[in-house]
Image (cartoon, grey):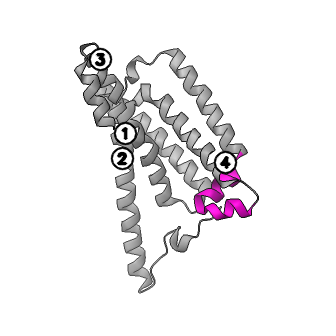
Amino acid sequence: MLSLGVLITSRSLSLVGDLEEILFGDLANVEWSTISIQFVALIGVVSVFTICRRPFLLLSVDEGLVNTSGFSAKLFHNVMMAMVATTIIVSFTTVGTLLVMGMLIAPAATGALFARRVSSMIMIAALSGSTSVYIGLLASYHYDLAAGASIVLTAVILFALSAIFTEARKSISHRHDGDHEPEHPHAHGHVHI
């Protein structure tokens, strides 16, 4: 569907100049009104997450746990999807439609590699995302690269380096422990909430 939309908009001469901005964002020309909207969305998403933390954590483990705990799984699933949609929509202007998914996935995946608890995963993901923005903007400035793409590429590189590090650590630990293989934090469906 996205590729079809790109084809249709690229046929319009008035949108050809804006096509790159739509796909990859324009971080250098973000207006204060856009930043204000993003800040309000950030406060809203963090507030909803803080209020609904327990049902969201249960939902991330098993939908049945949400229902047996007295919450509506369908309601909290829809609230979570609305939060994700809000995050995606307000991020379009800065990193673009194609790169926003990378910034949602790469920092979270990096956090999942190191964390044993959901709260730790959130903190590591936030640190990874912030580091990606800082390094990506520096690379963009010094090497005249697209800012959004530099940020997302940095996030993906951080994930790849983290994956290599955790695999090397497992391999070293496996050699030292003999036949005992260390369990992944999420092995057997156990997640510490």
- Looking at the rendered structure, the kind of residue marked 1 is Val
Question: Is there any visible trace of residue 28 in the rendered image?
Answer: yes
Q: Residues within 10 Å of mark 1 (few under 14, many from 20)?
A: many
Q: Which mark is residue 152?
A: 1
Q: Are marks 3 and 2 in contact (CB under 8 Å)?
A: no
Where 174 falls versus 139 (above or below)? Answer: below
As measured in the structure, the alpha-carbon distance from the residue carrying label 2 to the one carrying label 4 is 32 Å
Q: Residues within 10 Å of mark 4 (few under 14, many from 20)?
A: few
Where 41 falls versus 14 (above or below)? Answer: below
Q: Are marks 1 and 2 in contact (CB under 8 Å)?
A: yes
Marked residue nearer the N-terminal end (1 or 3): 3
Magenta span of residues: 52-69
As measured in the structure, the alpha-carbon distance from the residue carrying label 3 to the one carrying label 2 is 30 Å
Q: Is residue 58 magenta?
A: yes
Q: Which mark is residue 156?
A: 2
- Looking at the rendered structure, the kind of residue marked 3 is Leu
Q: Nearer the viewer, mark 4 or mark 3?
A: 4
- Looking at the rendered structure, the kind of residue marked 4 is Leu
x and y percentages locating residue 71 in the rendered image: 73, 55
Q: Which residue is mark 4?
A: 75
Q: Which residue is mark 3?
A: 15
Left or right relative to 114: residue 95: left
Q: Residue at x 64, y 56 (%)?
A: 57
Marked residue nearer the N-terminal end (3 or 2): 3
Q: Are marks 2 and 4 in contact (CB under 8 Å)?
A: no
